[in-house]
Image (spheres, coloured by chain):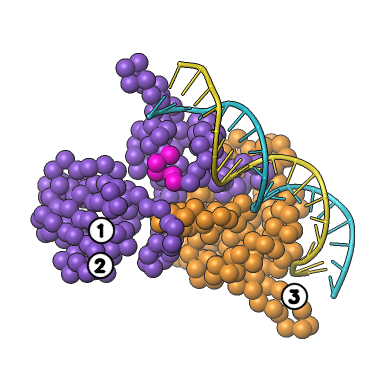
Chain colours: A purple, B orange, C cyan, D yellow
Amino acid sequence: MRSYDEYCSVAKTLDVVGDRWTLLIVRELLLRGASRYTDLRNGLPGIATNLLADRLRELEHAGVVSRREAAPPVATTVFTLTERGRALEPVLDELARWGVPYMVDGPAPGDAFRAHWLAWPARLFLRDRDPGGPPVEIALAVDGDDAVLESDQGEIWVRPGRAEHPAAEMTGPPYAILGVLSGRVDPERAGDRGLTVSGDVSALRRLLPD
Amino acid sequence: MRSYDEYCSVAKTLDVVGDRWTLLIVRELLLRGASRYTDLRNGLPGIATNLLADRLRELEHAGVVSRREAAPPVATTVFTLTERGRALEPVLDELARWGVPYMVDGPAPGDAFRAHWLAWPARLFLRDRDPGGPPVEIALAVDGDDAVLESDQGEIWVRPGRAEHPAAEMTGPPYAILGVLSGRVDPERAGDRGLTVSGDVSALRRLLPD
DNA sequence: CCGCATCCGGGGCGATACTG
DNA sequence: CAGTATCGCCCCGGATGCGG
């Protein structure tokens, strides 16, 4: 991005992460941890492949992302956030908080969705009623895309992939799942919204507000 | 900005404020309050005038900015943030915090500066040691640009313009003033950095950390 | 298959000129 | 004072190619 050429802290930050797609790449790396190029592409539907390569180079040069070559049998490149990159989490948090009103009406036609994007709604809305209790894993599945909602020591997070030992499973369209996470919809009264909840519902209920 | 078409809270926010210059326009409106078009241009050196007009229209349409026509004798247009627009302040706060490391080496050659941009460094670094005490005004002047650093009820803020009854005045280059505000430089030992402090230095010292 | 590089069309952006 | 008009450029989007 062309610099704003302003001696201002906000402008300097936007010089680094203000480009199109850049903060969404940081989002993916925050949620996924170490990621391959292809995984990032999958989490950024619509990005042009050359743009992703450009942005990763720029972020690496800015000290936000680091690149690692895996050992020969794997022979793949792995991208990670640096400490400086992880320091962007509060920025993403506030962007996500401000955007919540745009989520309550459900996805716009043509909107893509990935289950692990539920991480910020989950962190904003959920609270573990039993933070000292055993860790919980809840499997989320939407349109064949899997993610794991987990609470450990009162810390709530969502990561992509399948759960090892889920206490419960929730399947359905994104808007319905968001309704449950936000506390607007009871998990056992949500069948008519295309939502299926199985397993130990109380484990899920332990995380819900109200 | 072209939509990311993602059902994700972060992406939805960037659909609204992710365009170039947009968040800097919000910065100006946060710091200045109700502003005229020309004042905004002055606080956004380098912006193309058609871009400013476009952005203001988009922000108005998104419910972030509201436009008011003043009465005939004044006959000017005044732009203000809506409640929704002011809710972006935490986003700007975190962007500013992340950008602090880019400020410590001083401005890059060609960087523009406005005194009221010191608002976020001030809010990040300063703390009123006597929050119950009388309100303080400290005049800041840099390159002929004036701003007021004020503390009232423990709330620290910086606004553009001249102070009415400043307890102290600080004049000098931006980097030197930032050194004082961050606590790295003693206000009375900063003469060799081109800094001049006059008036009741203890009023300033009341706000400094350490 | 993974991680890009290259090419090309379109639109957002930058700079300046101009106007009610 | 508050914009509009215009024009060139470069960033971005989409497709394809290609070496490891």
Amino acid type, mark 1:
Gly
**Which chain is indicated by disc 3?**
B
What stretch of residues is rendered in magenta? A41-45
Taking the magenta stretch, the answer to whether it contains residue A42 is yes
Above-or-below relation of A170 to A3:
below
Mark 1–mark 2 CB contact (< 8 Å): yes
**Which chain is indicated by disc 2?**
A
Above-or-below relation of A158 to B150:
above
Amino acid type, mark 3:
Thr
- The residue tagged with tag 2: helix, strand or loop? helix
Amino acid type, mark 2:
Arg
Give me the residue at 62% from left, 41% from top.
A1
Q: Residues within 10 Å of mark 2 (few under 14, many from 20)?
A: some
- The residue tagged with tag 1: helix, strand or loop? loop
Q: CA distance from mark 1 to mark 3?
A: 53 Å
Tag 1 residue? A172
**In this rendering, position of residue A132 left or right of residue A1:** left
Q: CA distance from mark 3 to mark 2?
A: 51 Å
Tag 3 residue? B76
Mark 1–mark 3 CB contact (< 8 Å): no
Where is residue A179 drawn, in percent x and y?
28, 65
Q: Nearer the viewer, residue B84 or B193?
A: B84
Give me the residue at 69% from left, 60% from top.
B52
**In this rendering, position of residue A104 left or right of residue A159:** right
Tag 2 residue? A193
Going by the picture, which residue comes out furthest to the bottom?
A: B72
Q: Nearer the viewer, residue B4 or B49?
A: B4
Residue A25 visible in the displayed image: yes
